Image (cartoon, helix red, strand yellow):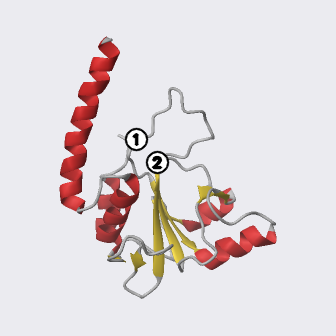
């Protein structure tokens, strides 16, 4: 019973924290909404007013549409849409192999950021006869080519301020 009491106390604490986060972002404190808010602030993305816009979370200043994902681990899976945006901005926690959930911890952390050109990723999957949709398996080298943080990528250069802000969310000491 002591475990139940402890979990109940932790859930109450988490609810207080989630309420404070929700007050800041003006949406429920779920990873998807938090990721959208963080990405919008750090990358200057104008979010769609309606959260029901299919496949598009917002637009970069240059007009490109973007779908923002925050995955708590990087396992090379990406949720894609046939009629998707121009690009996918993916925030991830640590790179991790597939694992069962008992004993696993998935911190809300941003250890890396990837910017995928949607048409290129979809074309690669089609060429390999792979499915396009939820949990599409994207090859590791495609992830590496799309990485814009912490590595430097000349295709999408981050400012020092953007890098410092992203570092605030890292789970690394």
Dot 1, how many residues are within 10 Å of its Cα: few (below 14), some (14-19), or many (20+)?
few
| Residue 43 can be seen in this image | yes
Q: Secondary structure at mark 2?
A: loop
Q: Which residue is mark 1?
A: 107
Pointer 2 or 1: first along the chain: 2
Q: Are marks 2 and 1 in contact (CB under 8 Å)?
A: yes
> How far across and how far down the image is residue 82, in percent?
64, 75
Depth check, front residue: 108 or 140 = 108
Q: Is residue 43 above or below residue 9?
A: below
Residue at the spot 28% in from the left edge and 60% down from the top edge = 27
**Residue 92: x, y in percent?**
47, 54
Identify which residue, 159 or 87, lies in the foreground: 87
The picture places residue 12, in percent across and down from the top left corner, at 23, 33
Q: Residue at x 29, y 55 (%)?
A: 28
Query: Which mark, by number, is residue 72?
Result: 2
Q: Position of 84 compared to 63: left or right?
A: right
Q: Name the residue at the bottom extreme.
A: 63
Q: Is residue 112 left or right of residue 117?
A: left
Measured as percent of width and height from the top left, residue 51 is found at 37, 70
Label drawn at residue 124: none
Residue for point 33% across, 19% down = 4
Figure quadrant of residue 38: bottom left
Quarter holding the C terminus?
Answer: top left
- The answer to whether residue 153 is visible is no
Q: Secondary structure at mark 1?
A: loop
Count neighbours of disc 2 (C-alpha within 10 A) and say few if under 14, some if 14 to 19, many if 20 or more: many
């Amino acid at each position: 019973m002591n475990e139940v009491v402890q979990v109940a106390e932790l859930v109450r604490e988490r609810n207080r924290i989630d309420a404070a986060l929700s007050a800041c972002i003006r949406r429920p404190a779920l990873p998807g909404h938090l990721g959208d808010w963080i990405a919008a602030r750090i990358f200057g993305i104008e979010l769609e007013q309606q959260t029901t816009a299919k496949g598009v979370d917002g637009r970069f200043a240059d007009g490109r549409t973007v779908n923002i994902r925050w995955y708590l681990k990087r396992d090379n899976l990406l949720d894609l849409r046939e009629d998707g945006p121009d690009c996918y901005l993916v925030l991830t926690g640590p790179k991790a192999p597939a694992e069962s959930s008992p004993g696993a911890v998935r911190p809300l952390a941003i250890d890396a950021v990837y910017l995928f050109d949607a048409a290129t990723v979809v074309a690669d999957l089609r060429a390999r006869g792979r499915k396009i949709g939820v949990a599409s398996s994207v090859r590791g080298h495609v992830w590496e080519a799309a990485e814009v943080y912490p590595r430097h990528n000349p295709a999408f250069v981050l400012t020092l301020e953007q890098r410092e802000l992203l570092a605030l969310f890292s789970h690394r000491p």
